[in-house]
Image (cartoon, grey):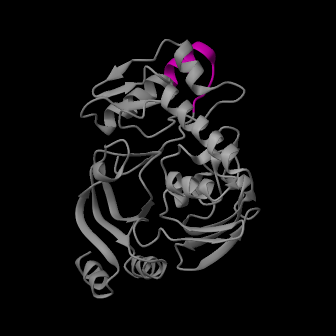
Amino acid sequence: MDEFISKLRDLNIGTIKKNEPMANHTTMKIGGPADLFIEPSSIENLAKTMDLIRQHNIKWTAIGRGSNLLVSDGGIEGAVIKLGRGMDEMELNGSELKAGGGYSLVALSTIISKKGLSGLEFASGIPGSIGGAVYMNAGAHGSDISQILTQAHILFEDGKMEWLSNEEMEFSYRTSILQKKRPGIVAEAVFQLKEGDRELISSAMQKNKDYRKETQPWNYPCAGSIFRNPLPDYAGQLIEKAGLKGHSIGGAKISDMHGNFIVNAGDAKAEDVLALIQHAKDTIFDLYGVKMETEVEIIGRK
């Protein structure tokens, strides 16, 4: 690992930290240390980082803004690659938008709305990055990334970079080809938006933001929705119906506002959240025969 770090520093890749607490990089404020934390300063340096990772056979994990993520108390083995500063550029060509994988989804939707472009209204309250949103086909309010993405620039673990079309991304509900079939990192993405009425777009965005504030516990550290909706049922409704809202284990608590949110109510550990997730799964299955699947990504040492 020391030789690997030395080569990273020689190449001036960007930010490099050893034993960095992942609680500093997740919206849930939970997670043990990463052996090595890397924040590349450009797409080119991201590619160089992956080349070195492959040469040294280092395990790697990519993150964005740390939403929809639960990192174990044992931390993460190998290298964590964060897409952030340096990978947050934006380019607008008419109604076609290109954005770096590290760009904030909320910030991007706000900027685009002010230009009178429609298509990102659903994202106005999703606290993730472009890379993470494309990776998991993030969505809300009846729309998702698959509805507007035309192509994504992906760095694969073999070092190759490819532009994948919407069809090649194999989007489905909160999933894409990148999660299991072809693991990779979203370096940048291109979206096709539509010209619209600026006031109507801003109104729709504000409505979405107000709905989230009124129904979701963003005043506590959380990771967003914990479970996928087991359609035609909804996870939050099943959990509320089972009387689990407000139930806590350690510092983790099922939100009083929304049953599909687990919040860090005070010094919660990942093991507290995992225990609460399992309790909800068991309870819902026992009561309704429904198998709950997590939407939040759970990573790190067991």
Q: Nearer the viewer, residue 174 or 151?
A: 151
Compared to residue 103, the image places residue 288 above or below, namely above
Q: Residue 237 occupies which quadrant of the picture?
A: top right
Look at 77% across and 62% down and name the residue there: 167
Residue 244 location (% of width, % of height): 46, 16
Q: Main secondary structure of the magenta part?
A: helix
Look at 63% across and 32% down and name the residue there: 229
Residue 277 location (% of width, % of height): 44, 30
Compared to residue 136, the image places residue 204 above or below, namely above
Residue 179 seen in render: no
Residue 183 seen in render: yes
Residue 135 location (% of width, % of height): 58, 57
Q: Residue furthest bottom?
A: 10
Q: Residue 169 occupies which quadrant of the picture?
A: bottom right
Look at 42% across and 80% down and name the residue there: 45
Residue 283 shown in magenta: yes
Q: Nearer the viewer, residue 75 or 155?
A: 155
Residue 106 shown in magenta: no
Q: Where is the N terminus found, in terms of image quarters?
A: bottom left
Look at 36% across and 25% down and name the residue there: 253
Q: Residue furthest front?
A: 199
Residues shaded magenta: 281-292
Q: Nearer the viewer, residue 116 or 252?
A: 116
Compared to residue 257, the image places residue 188 above or below, namely below
Residue 35 location (% of width, % of height): 27, 63
In the rendered view, does 7 fall on the left or right side of 234? left
In the rendered view, does 66 fall on the left or right side of 154? left
